[in-house]
Image (cartoon, rainbow, N blue to C red):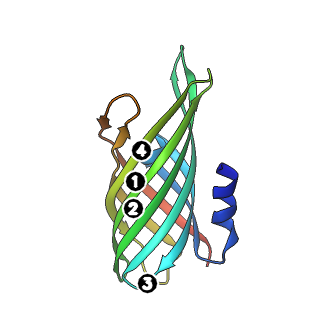
Amino acid sequence: MLLCCWVGLLAAQKPMHLSLEVGGSGGLASVNLEKQYVDRGKFQLHGRLGLSYMPVDQNNGGVIILPVMVHGLLGNKGHFADLGLGQTFSVTTQGSLFFRMPVGIGYRFQPEGRKYYLRASYTPLVSYLLDLQWEHWAGITFGYRIRN
Protein backbone atom coordinates (compact mmCIF):
# COMPACT_ATOMS: atom_id res chain seq x y z
CA MET A 1 0.00 0.00 0.00
CA LEU A 2 2.81 2.42 0.85
CA LEU A 3 4.40 1.76 -2.54
CA CYS A 4 1.11 2.68 -4.24
CA CYS A 5 1.09 6.01 -2.36
CA TRP A 6 4.64 6.83 -3.53
CA VAL A 7 3.83 5.86 -7.14
CA GLY A 8 0.69 8.00 -7.03
CA LEU A 9 2.70 10.95 -5.75
CA LEU A 10 5.28 10.63 -8.52
CA ALA A 11 3.01 9.77 -11.47
CA ALA A 12 1.29 12.92 -12.75
CA GLN A 13 3.02 16.14 -13.78
CA LYS A 14 1.69 18.40 -11.05
CA PRO A 15 3.67 20.68 -8.70
CA MET A 16 5.66 18.74 -6.09
CA HIS A 17 7.38 19.97 -2.94
CA LEU A 18 10.01 18.50 -0.63
CA SER A 19 9.54 19.75 2.91
CA LEU A 20 10.98 19.61 6.40
CA GLU A 21 8.43 19.77 9.19
CA VAL A 22 9.52 20.39 12.78
CA GLY A 23 6.86 18.98 15.08
CA GLY A 24 3.61 18.22 13.28
CA SER A 25 2.33 14.89 12.03
CA GLY A 26 5.72 13.14 12.08
CA GLY A 27 6.63 13.68 15.74
CA LEU A 28 9.76 15.71 16.44
CA ALA A 29 10.58 16.27 12.75
CA SER A 30 9.83 14.70 9.37
CA VAL A 31 10.89 14.90 5.74
CA ASN A 32 7.90 14.96 3.39
CA LEU A 33 7.09 14.71 -0.30
CA GLU A 34 3.98 16.72 -1.19
CA LYS A 35 2.10 16.82 -4.48
CA GLN A 36 -0.70 19.05 -5.69
CA TYR A 37 -3.65 17.10 -7.14
CA VAL A 38 -6.32 19.76 -7.59
CA ASP A 39 -6.02 23.48 -8.36
CA ARG A 40 -9.38 25.26 -8.66
CA GLY A 41 -8.23 28.84 -8.10
CA LYS A 42 -9.02 29.51 -4.45
CA PHE A 43 -9.05 25.80 -3.56
CA GLN A 44 -6.16 23.34 -3.83
CA LEU A 45 -5.86 19.72 -2.73
CA HIS A 46 -2.46 18.26 -1.83
CA GLY A 47 -1.29 14.79 -0.79
CA ARG A 48 1.73 14.39 1.48
CA LEU A 49 3.83 11.38 2.47
CA GLY A 50 6.55 11.64 5.11
CA LEU A 51 9.24 9.80 7.01
CA SER A 52 10.45 10.37 10.55
CA TYR A 53 12.56 8.60 13.18
CA MET A 54 12.36 9.35 16.87
CA PRO A 55 14.11 7.74 19.86
CA VAL A 56 11.58 6.70 22.51
CA ASP A 57 13.09 4.87 25.50
CA GLN A 58 15.16 1.79 26.43
CA ASN A 59 12.15 -0.55 26.30
CA ASN A 60 10.86 0.52 22.88
CA GLY A 61 14.08 1.73 21.25
CA GLY A 62 13.18 4.12 18.46
CA VAL A 63 10.12 4.57 16.31
CA ILE A 64 9.82 5.00 12.55
CA ILE A 65 6.82 7.17 11.67
CA LEU A 66 5.19 7.34 8.23
CA PRO A 67 2.65 10.19 8.10
CA VAL A 68 0.23 10.19 5.15
CA MET A 69 -1.82 13.40 4.87
CA VAL A 70 -4.34 15.12 2.62
CA HIS A 71 -4.37 18.93 2.76
CA GLY A 72 -7.03 21.30 1.51
CA LEU A 73 -5.83 24.86 0.91
CA LEU A 74 -8.31 27.74 0.82
CA GLY A 75 -7.16 31.21 -0.23
CA ASN A 76 -5.26 33.09 -2.88
CA LYS A 77 -2.34 35.44 -3.56
CA GLY A 78 0.01 33.33 -1.45
CA HIS A 79 -2.09 33.21 1.74
CA PHE A 80 -3.95 29.99 2.53
CA ALA A 81 -5.88 28.36 5.32
CA ASP A 82 -4.43 24.83 5.46
CA LEU A 83 -6.74 22.04 6.65
CA GLY A 84 -5.30 18.53 6.84
CA LEU A 85 -6.33 15.03 7.81
CA GLY A 86 -4.30 11.86 7.70
CA GLN A 87 -2.99 8.67 9.19
CA THR A 88 0.38 7.86 10.71
CA PHE A 89 1.85 4.39 10.77
CA SER A 90 4.46 3.96 13.50
CA VAL A 91 6.71 0.94 14.09
CA THR A 92 9.13 0.71 17.01
CA THR A 93 12.50 -0.98 16.63
CA GLN A 94 11.10 -3.61 19.04
CA GLY A 95 8.28 -4.44 16.59
CA SER A 96 5.27 -2.65 18.12
CA LEU A 97 2.83 -1.03 15.67
CA PHE A 98 0.83 2.14 16.36
CA PHE A 99 -1.74 4.13 14.37
CA ARG A 100 -2.70 7.74 14.94
CA MET A 101 -4.75 10.25 13.03
CA PRO A 102 -3.15 13.69 12.71
CA VAL A 103 -5.44 16.63 12.08
CA GLY A 104 -3.98 19.90 10.81
CA ILE A 105 -5.36 23.43 11.09
CA GLY A 106 -2.94 26.13 10.04
CA TYR A 107 -1.73 28.94 7.85
CA ARG A 108 0.37 28.47 4.69
CA PHE A 109 2.34 31.28 3.08
CA GLN A 110 3.33 30.45 -0.49
CA PRO A 111 4.33 33.60 -2.39
CA GLU A 112 3.30 33.69 -6.04
CA GLY A 113 6.21 33.09 -8.40
CA ARG A 114 8.43 31.65 -5.65
CA LYS A 115 9.54 28.06 -5.13
CA TYR A 116 9.10 27.87 -1.35
CA TYR A 117 6.31 27.85 1.22
CA LEU A 118 6.07 28.20 4.98
CA ARG A 119 3.36 26.66 7.14
CA ALA A 120 2.50 26.93 10.82
CA SER A 121 -0.16 24.59 12.14
CA TYR A 122 -1.89 23.15 15.16
CA THR A 123 -1.58 19.41 14.56
CA PRO A 124 -3.23 17.33 17.28
CA LEU A 125 -2.60 13.58 17.13
CA VAL A 126 -5.73 11.51 17.72
CA SER A 127 -5.44 7.93 19.01
CA TYR A 128 -8.68 6.05 18.39
CA LEU A 129 -8.14 2.28 18.48
CA LEU A 130 -8.61 1.40 22.17
CA ASP A 131 -9.95 4.69 23.45
CA LEU A 132 -10.08 8.25 22.19
CA GLN A 133 -7.01 10.29 23.13
CA TRP A 134 -6.24 13.79 21.84
CA GLU A 135 -2.58 14.90 22.06
CA HIS A 136 -2.00 18.61 21.48
CA TRP A 137 0.83 19.18 19.01
CA ALA A 138 2.01 21.84 16.57
CA GLY A 139 4.31 22.07 13.58
CA ILE A 140 6.35 24.48 11.46
CA THR A 141 7.08 23.49 7.84
CA PHE A 142 9.48 24.76 5.22
CA GLY A 143 8.82 23.39 1.73
CA TYR A 144 10.63 23.83 -1.58
CA ARG A 145 9.14 23.12 -5.01
CA ILE A 146 11.18 20.47 -6.80
CA ARG A 147 8.88 20.14 -9.83
CA ASN A 148 6.47 22.53 -11.54
Q: CA distance from mark 4 to mark 3?
A: 27 Å
Q: What whole-number distance in Å separates the C-alpha atoms at marks 2 and 4?
A: 19 Å
| Mark earlier in primary sequence (3, 2) | 3
Earlier-in-chain disc, 1 versus 2: 2
Judged from the image, the secondary structure of the residue bearing numbered disc 2 is strand
Residue 58, quarter of the rendered image? top right
Q: Do the residues under discs 1 and 2 have CB atoms within 8 angstroms? A: yes
With respect to residue 56, does 105 lie above or below? below
Give the residue type at disc 1: Ile
The residue that mark 4 highlights is 101
Q: Residues within 10 Å of mark 3 (few under 14, many from 20)?
A: few
Residue marked by disc 3: 40
Whichever of labels 3 and 1 marks the residue nearer the N terminus, that label is 3
Q: Where's residue 147, x and y in %? A: 64, 74
Quarter of the figure that contains the C terminus: bottom right
Q: Nearer the viewer, mark 3 or mark 2?
A: 3
